Amino acid sequence: MDTQRTVLWLVFGLSLILLWDRWQVYQGRNSTFRPAVTAPAPAAPSGAAPRTPGDVPAPNAQATVPSAQSAAASGAPQTAAASASGERIQIKTDLLWAEFDPLGATLVRVELPSQKLAPDWTEEGLAKLLGLTDFLHSQGFGRPGRGGHGDHVVLLDTSAGRTYQAQTGLIGGSPEDPFPNHRATRFEFAGGPHALAQGQDTLVVRFEAQSGGVRLVKTFTFRRGHYDIQVAHEVTNVGESPASPSLYLQLVRDGGKPEEDSSFYRTYTGPAFYSDVMKYRKISFDDIDKKKADDLKPADDGWVAIVQHYFVAAWVPGKGVTREFYGAERDRLYSVGTLIRMGTLAPGASASLPATLYVGPQDQKTLEAIAPGLERVTDYGWLDPIAKPLFWLLGAVHSLVGNWGFAIVLLTVLIKAAFYPLSAASYKSMAKMKELQPRLVKLREQYGEDRQKLQLAMMELYKQEKINPVMGCLPVLVQIPVFIALYWVLLASVEMRNAPWILWIRDLATPDPWFVLPVVMMASMWIQYKLNPTPPDPVQAKMMAIMPFIFGAMFFFFPAGLVLYWVVNNALSILQQWRIGQVVARSKQRG
C-alpha cells in the first residue's frame, strides 16, 4: 500500500510540476500569478552609422525604429502613428492589412482582419454577475481596452505600447554614404493600387532607393488567401567601382507579452531558428541578453522567426543561399535575422535574392508548405512525437463532426478506448486494494511503529490475495505522456481560437465564463479520490483529499477546451473504475 500511495503521489506531483514548468519556467519569465510588466518603450534613434559589410548588423539594426515617445507626443493614434519620415503606405488584402514606413521600406504594422480578438470573458458570465470584472482586470485577466486595436489581431505594430517590425536592407558602403538600409535610407513608393481589387489575385508593391553607388529595389507580392508575402530584393551596382553588399532580413521586437497572453499560464514568446545543421532551436529574449545566440552556425537552408501564442512572423530566404543567423539586443529591442553575402558586383551588374515573409497564424499545413520545419513553431514541448499524431487525429475527427468541442470529446473517448486494457488492469488492482483496506488497518494497529514487521505482514497479505500493488500504478504512468501531449495540443493549436462548443462556451481558447466546466472537473476529481483506496496514513489521506481542490482550482482560468478534455477524461475514468469495482466486488462475493 505504501508503494502504491507513493507512486500515485508522484504521479500527481509530476503533473503539477509539469503544469508549473509550462507556466513559469519552461516558456515564461514573469510570475504566473500577476500580470507581466510591459516592456519599456523603445529608445529614441541613436543615429549611429551602419556597420561595414563584414559585420553582423544586429546590434545597431534597431537604432532607428520610430520611437514610442515621438508617436505619443505627436498625438497620432497608437494603431497608425505617423512615420517620422513621411506618411505610411497602407496596403489591404483579404488577409493582411499592412503599413510600410518609407524609411527603409519597413513593414511596421500588420493587422489580420480574419483573426478576431477573443471576447473578454470577464465581462460576461459569473464574473460580471458578481461584479468581479474590474478586480480580474487588475490581476491581469481578461483584456480591458483591447489595446486600441479594435476587433482584429495586430501582429506587427509600431505604437506607444509595442515595437514589432520586419526590416530589410544592405550592409556595406562608406559611413558617409552607406548602401540602402532601413535606418538611414528613404525609399520611394512606385505607386499603383493599395488594395486587392475584387477578382484580383495578386498585389505588387514596389519600393526603390539608391545610395553608396548601389540601387536596391524591394518588391513585395501579396496574394489572395495567403499570409505569406513574396519579397524580392534586386541589387544593382550603379557606381564606378566594384561593390560587395550583404542583404539582411530581420525581425525587431520588444520583449513584452502579446495582448492576448494569459496572466495565469504562459506560452513561449520569443525567437526561433531552424536549419538542417542546428534543427529547431528556441533562443528566448533572456538568452539573447546572455549572448546565447552567438553560436548560431551558417547554413544553406533554414529560417528565423519570432513566435507567440497562436501566431508567428518568419523570414525564409530563398533555397540554396548560404545565410548567417544572428540575434542581438539594444535598448530593450531584440533583432533576429539572417545575413546573406551577395559577393562582388562589378559596375552595372545586378543580383536578385528572393525571400518569403510570413505574418499570420500558426496553421501547420500552411507553414509546412512554405519551408521545412516551419510548422514546428507550434511547439508541443518535449512530447512533440506524440503530440503531432494526436493533432492529426483531432483534425480528422473535426472533419467528421465539424465542431472542435465535440472533436475534443470524441478524441478523448478514442484515447480512453485505446488504453482500456491498461486502465482496466490498474482499476482492477485498485479495487482489490480497496477491499483489503479494513485488513490493512488492522495490521497497522497490530504492529504499531514496527514498520519492518508491518511491511512483511502486508507483503504476505498481498501474496495471499494475489495482488501486486505496483500494477495499480504502472498502467497510469504509461498513459501520462499521451494525456500531457494532448494537453499541449489543445493549448497550442490556433484552431481552438474563437471556436465555439455549445451554449455559453463561445471560445474554447478562453476560460468558461460561468466556471461550470472547472467546477464539474473538481467534482469529478473528488469522486475519483473517493473511488480509490484511502491511504492508511492520516496525513497522506488528508493530502490526497485536498488534491482535487488544489488541482481543480488551477483550471478555473484555463482555456475551456483544456478543461473540457479533462472533464471528459475524468468522467470516463469514473465510469470505468466504478464498473470494474462492481465486477471485483461481485467476484469476491461469489468466491
Image (cartoon, helix red, strand yellow):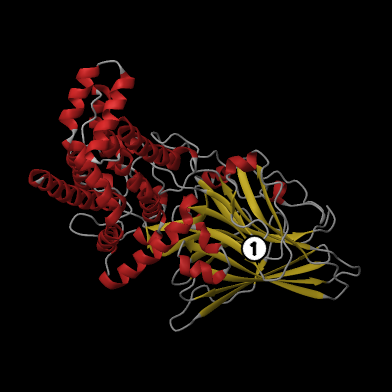
Which residue does the image show at 32% across and 59% down from the upper left? 498
Can see residue 82? no
Q: Horizontal placement of 288 versus 270: left or right?
A: right
Q: Is residue 224 above or below residue 68?
A: below
Q: Can residue 498 be seen in this view?
A: yes
Q: Which of 185/530 is in front?
A: 530
Quarter in which the N terminus is drawn: top left
Amino acid residing under circle 1? Gly
Tell me the element at label 1.
loop
Residue 105: % across, % down: 64, 63
In the picture, measured across the screen, residue 123 lies left or right of residue 44, that is left
Looking at the image, which residue is at 15% across and 51% down?
Answer: 579
Give the percent coordinates (x, y) of residue 300.
Answer: 71, 65
Q: Which residue is at a point 40% across and 59% down the rendered structure image?
A: 494
Residue 298, image x and y in percent? Answer: 73, 58
Question: Which residue lies under the disc numbered 1?
Answer: 302
Which of the pair 577/501 is nearer the observer? 577
